[in-house]
Image (cartoon, rainbow, N blue to C red):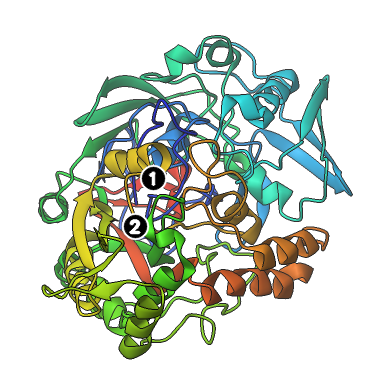
Amino acid sequence: MHTFTRPAAAVAAAATAALVLAGCAGGGGNAPTGGSGEYVDGATFTLSEVADPGALDPQLSAVSSLFQLSQFAYDALVSIDADGEIGSQLASDWVVDGQTVTLTLNEGVTCSDGTEFTAQTAADNLNWVADPENQSPLLGSFLPPGLTATAEGSTLTLELSAPAPFVLQGLANVHMVCAAGLEDRTILTAGTSGTGPYVLTEAVPNDHYTYEAREDYTWGPNGASTADEGMPAKVIARIIPNETTAANLLTTGEVNASTIVGPDAQRLESAGLFSAGEEVLIGEQWYNQGETHATSDPAVRMALTQALDLAELQKVLTSGAGAPATRLTVVAPSACTYDAVSGNTPGTDVEAAKALLDDAGWVAGADGIRAKDGQQLALSFLYANTLGTGGTSAAELAVQQWEAIGVKVDAAQNDSTALTEAIFGTGAWDIAWVPLNVNNPDQVIGFVSGPAAPEGTNFAGIQNADYEAAVAEAMAIPGVEGCDTWQEAEASLFASADVVAFANSVIKTYGSGAEFERVGVIVPTSIRMLAD
């Protein structure tokens, strides 16, 4: 789930404060299976988003609210479906040969302004994202560092500086901007310049965004077209922060689709509404390891982790409907399916946690709060409002458990904009619940290693030598053959309490008067409006 924008002093807002991170580019263009009614043309599809996407440049933010909206106005070179199959989109053919990727672009692709989209435009896009000076969060997440792109006619050639086992999956998440947007990126802040099935016609921040269908669009995922029966003529994305309000609007038909995380989902299920769901990592805890923070001390991080009853937090966070976390790459289509969490995450041990703090010099005072060198162990704890009511209850429980070992914790719920500004910009946080969701393990690298924010996307400032060594080995192994090594890499993050993953949940997007497919986000060309 959702939002935030790029802080001026930080690396572009990366995909982390979103509950369902981008990293799930839309796949097939066919209607959802199991349709329950007749389709109607010319209708309006109204989508509820929990938070505003901020600036709309699709290459300067990867948060899921913007990623969802970008799907309507932009295309990627290739698509990917829920089964992990790579399909056509802007490119009709592709070949991966070692560290060279060759793609052939579809003929007749045009931008919303009527200009032609060429292989050279695609190369310009990739080279812009690949330039570290542009600080795109897509670099290192979806586009391999060191990549260079060239074009000749309709052929696009990518040269990789190192092996990239999931390069096509990454390309499926890089939205292509048309030449006008590349020449003047200011028009992308509140407008669109893309080849997608829709074009933005109205933007009212924190209220709504309106998109109109393009009649000439025929190059969607696997040949999807806006002429397909039941495709909406207009899409309106409404910003509705309150889940109960969104659920109420679903039941009255004023909203056609909304992702519901909390207990309101139960009444929507009872009402028999259409839904499309997928498993995501919803409970994920991070520590600020910057040198001025108490959480830079491994003993403090371990103590804070051991103080928690993670199983109970998982139940509270997911309203009893979730499951224990298994890995960092849960969202389908996931190339690797392993459990790196079990047996690696430190278990609950309150007495051991207290002993760690004692040994680290944090002594309990008369008020029960620990202090060291005259400084109380007082920490700030941020959590996303996209976690719903379960997130608030779970956060309150976590604070109680930390207070039980003598730690003073100030918890604050943040919208995605504020959360992003803190973790990528000001650094004014100690503990954060920021669910990072991606498909493939190489997409995690930039968030858990490399330069710390604001110079990089490693917002927690993690430096784990075991992780980095395993990643170096895994990157040289083709595709799924390296999954065991990727598992080893992730396990080192959990064992050292650099990352604490504790809850998975099936997140559903409910539909009223419409059906659709969800591959991380709603696939625009899969939307079918239903007759009354």
Q: What residue type is labelled 1?
A: Ile
Q: Name the residue under label 1.
A: 423
Q: Position of residue 504 (x, y in %)?
A: 40, 72
Q: Name the residue under label 2.
A: 432
Q: In which quarter of the image is residue 358?
A: bottom left
Could you tell me if the residues under marks 2 and 1 are in contact, i.e. CB atoms within 8 Å? yes
Q: What residue type is labelled 2?
A: Ala
Q: For mark 2, does the 10 Å Cα neighbourhood hold few (<14), some (14 to 19), or many (20 or more) residues?
A: many
Mark 1 secondary-structure assignment: helix
Q: Where is residue 328 in the image (x, y as percent from the top left)?
A: 52, 66
Can you tell which mark lies on residue 335? Answer: none
Q: In this view, does 389 lie above or below 257?
A: below
What is the C-alpha distance between the residues marked 2 and 1? Answer: 8 Å
Q: Which of 412 and 155 is in front in this view?
A: 412
Q: Is residue 434 above or below residue 2?
A: below
Residue depicted at 47% across the width and 58% down the height: 437
